[in-house]
Image: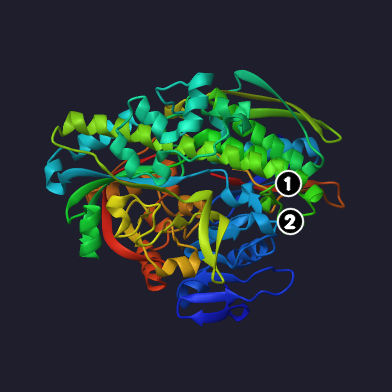
Amino acid sequence: MDLNRLEQDSEFRWRIPAAAPMNVPGILYGDREQILQMDDKVYEQLRNVTMLPGLAGPVYAMPDAHWGYGFPIGGVAAFDADAGGVVSAGGVGFDISCGVRMLHTGMQADDIGDARTALADSLYANIPAGVGSEGSISLDDASMRAMLQGGAQWAVDQGYGTAADLDRTEERGCIAGADPEAVSERARKRQRREMGTLGSGNHYLEVQRVAEILDPATAAAYGLAVDELVISIHCGSRGLGHQIGTDFLREMLLAAETFGIALPDRELACAPIQSELGQRYIGAMRAGMNCALANRQIITHLTRAVFRDLFPQAELSMLYDVSHNICKVETHVVDGVARELHVHRKGATRAFGPGNPDIDESLREAGQPVLIGGSMGTGSYVLAGTTESEERALSSACHGAGRAMSRRKARREYGGRQVVDDLASRGIDVRSPSLRGIAEEAPLAYKDVNRVVDNAARAGLARKVARLAPVVCIKG
Amino acid sequence: MHGRSWEHFEHDADIGLRASASSRDGLFEAMAEALTALITDPGTVRPVESVPIRCEAPDDALLLTDWLNALVYEMATRRMLFGDWQVSIEDHALDAVAKGEPVDRDRHQPVVEVKGATYTSLFVNQDSSGTWHGQCIVDV
């Protein structure tokens, strides 16, 4: 990115000054080198978002920001319904409520013994992943409606988990205001056989070892200790969310003119929050969020069954579940005034600081866990929300490493078999239906997650709690 | 398959499809082939089942995303891959038959599921020599 087009607010904060037709400034977080390495498309896409109506304060790009569609990935924008603000299907994207769930296991890394391969095989056999996979649960119309309304709470009621899981899930596993009737028949049909499936692309289930504790007090509050095994589940609302995105992007694009909205990029298709279309999308999107929460809950159940079989001593309890592709209504202080805003986070994680009443009481003092996925080989992080993040980026942080090279380039550079063998030699068992898929997800195809997380922490968006190293990785 | 070509182009998070053809029908067929090529080698897909697809849109660019999204939907709900397409477009109404077979994970080694076609960097146009060009970024 050309730094000449930016003003530098501080070592880790850069500004695109608001100049017509922008309505607000754009703020980017990252050190000089990271911003330099960002594609100019991030600048363009962030600037496009600043032109949308009803924005409350600046639009933000997290340190892992990269070229997306409509919004940059790593983009955060908040809109005020009373000021003509919009909700954007493009600002949420196709993978509604994609997020990360982390589970404790109560096991130490050594407890796996020589069962690592058996664990990888069993997880791969029991958790549907990849193109053409199907879940074992088929939903009829009434069950589909109940799932879209009830989210992870519905899944727990069906026997896929316990009430304690819900305490540690964003929205206690069920976002209010979901409208199953706003979800098209096509979206429901696409989901019918996809409950409890991981999907493909960058989605995964990993068994990870806590490699390093970076904030002992917070790690203790989260129940994390060095060498403990944890499980990360990264997936979203599957075909249902993808189809909701497809349906509403088209409808919002065609309706934009009738609302008098000039779209700087058609992918920013949106509608006023207070319009019938805006409200219908919000209802459908929330149903999509409930689908994602139910999906991760069912995968949790499947994972527990695998561990129970191989390691009867394991106890898979929830650390947290948080989404990173969603629009939520939250209260934030903008220019000294508390306002109820529709906050879009696309490839950005909500990061509420200590004391926030929306965090479960058991975690409230420490701040919300922020779960960051890295690549198959480089590891992941647990961060915690900070008080400063509220003022800096509406309590938001990064969500992952971000790609460093395109899928096509990764495919040319790496062989899937070579990646699997290299990782195996480092003690990481990978299972996937596709070697080409593994090549496209090769560790070096991603940016250095350490650097992204360092910059998020140094910018005050979140603080580092623990670094995790992969042991077993199931890729779709 | 004559008189048309396609390629995938670089995108940070997702992937771009780009194609050219001597006719608009051919362009849409080439874009469908580029879509399948994200998932598997189109040459490995046997045309044993036919699926009719119809779309209508206010312009060619939207018709292209509608076409690609219809293929994504049929692949997802039928658990199929497509390897052959016959497209016929009148004005902005598309009538097509996509031929393929159920996903065979061993033989097709499917790489990635496509979530949807986006409107970013989307275009369909015809140059002065009469050749049709189009591109679309899809979310994977």
Q: Is residue A306 above or below residue A8?
A: above
Chain at numbered mark 2:
A
Q: CA distance from mark 2 to mark 1?
A: 8 Å
Kindly identify the residue that appears in the image at 31 percent across and 64 percent down. Answer: A464
Residue A181 visible, this orientation: yes
Three-letter residue code for mark 2:
Leu
> Which residue is identified by label 1?
A253
User: Which disc number belongs to residue B96?
Assistant: none
Q: Is residue A356 above or below residue B32?
A: below
Kindly identify the residue that appears in the image at 71 percent across and 52 percent down. Answer: A266
User: Which disc number belongs to residue A263?
Assistant: 2
Query: Which of the pair B24/A446 is nearer the observer?
Result: A446
Name the N-terminal-most of marks 2 and 1. 1
Residue at the farthest front position: A337
Image x and y of residue A48, in percent:
67, 62
- What element does badge 1 sit on? helix
Please state if A242 lies on the left or on the right of A455 as rendered. right
Which class describes the residues within 10 Å of circle 2: few (<14), some (14-19), or many (20+)?
Answer: some
Image x and y of residue A320, in percent:
33, 47
Please state if A89 lies on the left or on the right of A366 as rendered. right
Q: Is residue A373 above or below residue A61?
A: above
Q: Are marks 2 and 1 in contact (CB under 8 Å)?
A: yes
Kindly identify the residue that appears in the image at 77 percent across and 57 percent down. Answer: A262
**Where is the N terminus of chain A found, in terms of image quarters?**
bottom right
Three-letter residue code for mark 1:
Leu
Please state if A410 lies on the left or on the right of A49 as rendered. left
Query: Which of the pair A116/A49 is nearer the observer?
Result: A49
